[in-house]
Image (tube, rainbow, N blue to C red):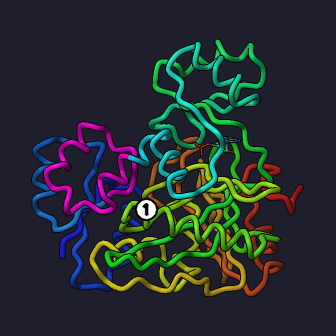
Amino acid sequence: MKIGILGNGQLGQMLESSVTDLNDLEISLYDLRAHEEGKLNAFINEVDIVSYETENIPAHIVELLEPVEDKVFPSLKALKVFQNRLLEKNALRAAGIDTADFCAVNSLQDVHTAIETLGLPIVMKTTTEGYDGKGQFVLRTPEDAEPAWNTIGSRELIAEAFVPFLRETSVIASRDRDGNINVWPMTENVHHEGILRYSLYPAAGLSEEKAQIAERYIRDLANSLDYVGTITLELFETEQGLVANEVAPRVHNSGHWSIEGAEASQFRNHMLALSGKTLGNTESKYPAVAMLNVIGEEDSSIKADSLSNAYRHSYGKEARPARKLGHITVVADSVEERDLTIDALVDVMPEGVWPAKN
Ligand code: AMP
């Protein structure tokens, strides 16, 4: 079976390498940055299944997939929903999942209306193509309305009530073609300057009740869209419960730990789901796991090579500020051992980001 992945970045590469032992699967990656209509048509005609490593696929490329939508997984319908924050929030609500209150914003008057109906603070975002905190504006006073509109108002916007969260978490699952779903344990995710810096399993002190709610959420969401493949739900943890922030119709940075940390990784189960095979076990193989991103420069990550419980992944990319160049997975027999190992690798993180060093 031939599977073609749109996108040849690190996610595409890790999807490909997750099934190198399965001889009946032939994987090819399509470089979206070098897109040409003829090239894409040839690519999609050659493969049995089309998938993608990113939801940021321009509309003119999505259009070319319409004629072959039966072989696109996750479905084009799911892709379109999760490309747009308004459609996404509506889909979350329809599946019975808590989100921040929100409304569409298409004019400066709408910004004022949003302030009246949602109250302040408000997080205003472009509905499409925002990632890592780009295309966002936090409004704290009514006077912020105009600068916010002038900064990002050239595009369709969504206004969201600000969620006073305790921390950010995510839950990832794969759903196969028969509707079976396997869910990985949740991680706690810590960002710095809008970019994920590290993820921890277990998320300290996470109640069994909240873990079960997250699992129910992702199952209901995947079922509601007859979703096939790996799906990620980012959740704010608040005093009261869990509030969905956003969905990625794909493998996610906060699930990279599963390559070494779980029996089946998020990448492998995505490929197994697409190709109609049985999903692998998603439980953690270790009592404690961490994923540290290597951002901007790689030298700081070399230390991982000398640690027996750390695995360094390099994406082979040229260094640039704020660019994800690789990640390190830490596996451990206890949270204490995990955290001591992160202490030893603290140089991969900006000052103050890893709390044990504060
Ligand atoms: P996003 O691109 O939607 O993931 O937003 C980027 C970051 O902005 C999130 O990881 C949060 O830290 C913050 N954020 C986004 N939406 C909200 C919200 N409604 N309330 C509070 N913080 C938010």
Q: Position of residue 282 (x, y in %)?
A: 53, 81
**Image: 266 above or below 63:** below
Q: Residue at x 62, y 57 (%)?
A: 299
Q: Which residue is drawn at 64% across and 56% down?
A: 235
Q: Residue 205 lies in magenta, yes or no?
A: no
Residue marked by disc 1: 224
Q: In which quarter of the image is the N terminus?
A: bottom left
Number of numbered markers: 1
* Left or right, 80 with reference to 156: left
* Left or right, 262 with reference to 30: right
Q: Where is residue 50 in the image (x, y as percent from the top left)?
A: 24, 61
Q: Residue at x 57, y 32 (%)?
A: 103
**Image: 146 above or below 321:** above
Identify the secondary structure beneath mark 1. Answer: helix
Question: In what quadrant does ligand 1 lie?
Answer: top right
Q: Residue 62 lies in magenta, yes or no?
A: yes
What span is in magenta? Answer: 52-80
Q: Position of residue 144 (x, y in %)?
A: 71, 17
* Left or right, 305 with reference to 47: right
Identify which residue, 289 or 64, lies in the foreground. Answer: 64
Magenta segment, principal secondary structure? Answer: helix
* Left or right, 107 with reference to 52: right
Dot 1 alpha-carbon crowd within 10 angstroms: few under 14, some 14 to 19, many 20 or more: some
